[in-house]
Amino acid sequence: MALKIEQTAGRTIGRRQGKRAVTHGTGRRRRSGLRPNVLVGALLVGMLVLAGVLAPLLAPYPPDQIQPALRLRPPSLEHPFGTDAFGRDLYSRVLHGARIALRISLLSVLLAAAPGIWLGLLAGYHRGWSEQILSRLMEIWLAFPGLLLAIVLVARLGPSLDTTVIALGVVGLPSFYRLARNGTISARHALYVEAARALGIGQTRILLRHILPNLASPLIVLVTLRMGTMLLAAGGLSFIGLGAQPPLPEWGALLATGRDYLDTAWWLAFFPGLAFTLSVTGFNLLGDGLRDLLAPETREGTAR
Amino acid sequence: MAGYVLRRLAGAVLMLLAVSLIVFVLLDVIPGDAAHTLAGDLASAEQLAAARHELGLDQPLPVRYARFVEGVVLRGDLGASVVSGRPVATLLSERFGATLKLALAALGLALVAGLLIGALAAIRAGGYLDLAVMAGATLGESLPSFWVSLLLIQVFALRLGWLPVFGAGSPAHLVLPAVTLALPAIALLARLVRSCLLDVRSADFVRTARAKGLGPLLVWRDHIFRNAILPVITILGLYLGHVLGGAFIVETIFAWPGLGRLVVQAIFDRDVPVVVGAVLLIALIYQVLNLAVDLIHAVLDPRVGHEAL
């Protein structure tokens, strides 16, 4: 889990080579068109979004409805994922968990991306000492391996879903900064930027309307991949008790509960874990596929 | 070379100072501070104040930070655990041994399995085996470690009873956590090795080597392997850094007495000196590994060497 964030660095290298090799190995060179991985990824992410948005409609029971008579029932037609120790319907809880998962990945990526990209644009555009300071700062940030900084932040702020989102946003910031900074550095002397400057267009407008759209492709890829890593990281934090707390049907918290019933009620840990795996696989496949479609040249740029 | 290493080491020291300062400041106002832990929940205001004084918590932050750095630099003293009263340095060295054992087991497993699977897939590139390996690798990278460990415990410890559920002590205790930690790395390595081999195999310099009559063994040893191994080393370095300093979840699940579990436990206990010390040690490991990876690169790849040194 901590790995996830760290691993993305490695993953990018692996992916980059992997994709090139596929074209080698099979002799098929498909430069355009959707690959199956994008489709599967989009399908899985679509399922997560649908489940999250429609959870109140799709869920057969309220997620917190306690039915003591139905405690620890194995999966059945009435309760597809079984029930927990309070007789709550696990299927409904996992669906509502999708809502939380969606919120976690969207909010934490937004918290990381918005300031990260803006600082990166500014630093790349101005260079100079302010860029130096910012970049050193980001390096210090990255000297905390993996989730360590998030864990320390959660310790400081107290464990809850909100602090997890904040901590993950803070941890994810440097990768967006780096991507935006590097892109801006290579774009700021491009003809279209010089032209905009010559026309007397203000700095904010140049950054947002001229440079940012040109960085959109790698940023979209990074956002997609990060949604998966954030989701996984948040799940890990709540699993060890440093994230969302139990009554909340967050998947990591559900898994933590399921851990106590491993030998009596396997379904309690199985289905939340499956939901995690499918969602994260979805984000990874979609992000990889988008990279091949949108920004094949920036494969290395998204590393960390 | 020596100059480069010195520069990097100086950078690492500055980095560690910054990291320690950040952790110190962040954990300074942690709710319910160590004095509560020391004095107990029912302590009177005077007892609390006495405990604060004893711990030095009544001093302003800059003073405490300066004292801390002084202690570390001059005496290698990281303070004492608020909970157990034992020196943090001792705790860390005990825990580091367990973590190192786990990390090396996982690394070895990942290396052997990853190389084998990746090479197999490369040999059968485009075939069903290759397809299966690539699909498995994609899934393997997305599997949450906390779920994998629960599945493994369920099957191999509870159902089959082959292995202990958690704890440490015998080699059998090592198996499940090591496998859990190794799985994503196996997936990553298999993918990487496969693609590197395919890439390098069809590179111009390999064709040249073959054309000039070099035997297949020499081509593999001097040209293919040497080039394919570089990205593998980078990944292994990052991975080792992660397992040595970031295996919070796996160590917690399997009750493995390593650094990750120490940090999590210390955070629950509000044992700030232990958290600070452990974070510093983990950051140090991370810096050293990064440096080592870069140096290995410089030695193995002359192109990197000339630029960096």
Image (tube, grey):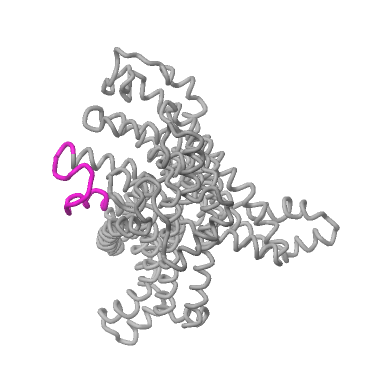
User: Does residue B277 lie above or below B293 as drawn?
Assistant: above
Q: Position of residue B289 (x, y in %)?
A: 41, 67
Q: Is residue A39 visible?
A: no
Q: Is residue B283 magenta?
A: no
Instruction: Please tell me which residue lies in front, A28 or B112.
Output: B112
Q: Is residue A9 visible?
A: yes
Instruction: Tell me: B284 left or right of B134.
Output: right
Residue under the image location 32 percent in, 40 percent down: B147
Instruction: Tell me: B255 left or right of A291.
Output: left
Instruction: Tell me: A20 left or right of A67.
Output: right
Q: Quadrant of residue B153?
A: top left
Q: Is residue B168 magenta?
A: yes
Instruction: Please tell me which residue lies in front, B171 or A121.
Output: B171
> What span is in magenta?
B158-179
Q: Quadrant of residue A125?
A: bottom right
Residue under the image location 49 percent in, 35 percent down: A160
Instruction: Please tell me which residue lies in front, A213 or A23.
Output: A213
Residue under the image location 47 percent in, 77 percent down: B5
Instruction: Please tell me which residue lies in front, B48 or B247.
Output: B48
Q: Position of residue B191 (x, y in %)?
A: 35, 58
Instruction: Tell me: B228 left or right of A112.
Output: left
Q: Position of residue B87 (x, y in %)?
A: 36, 56
Q: Quadrant of residue B205?
A: bottom left
User: Does residue A23 lie above or below A247 as drawn?
Assistant: below
Q: Position of residue A210 (x, y in %)?
A: 73, 54
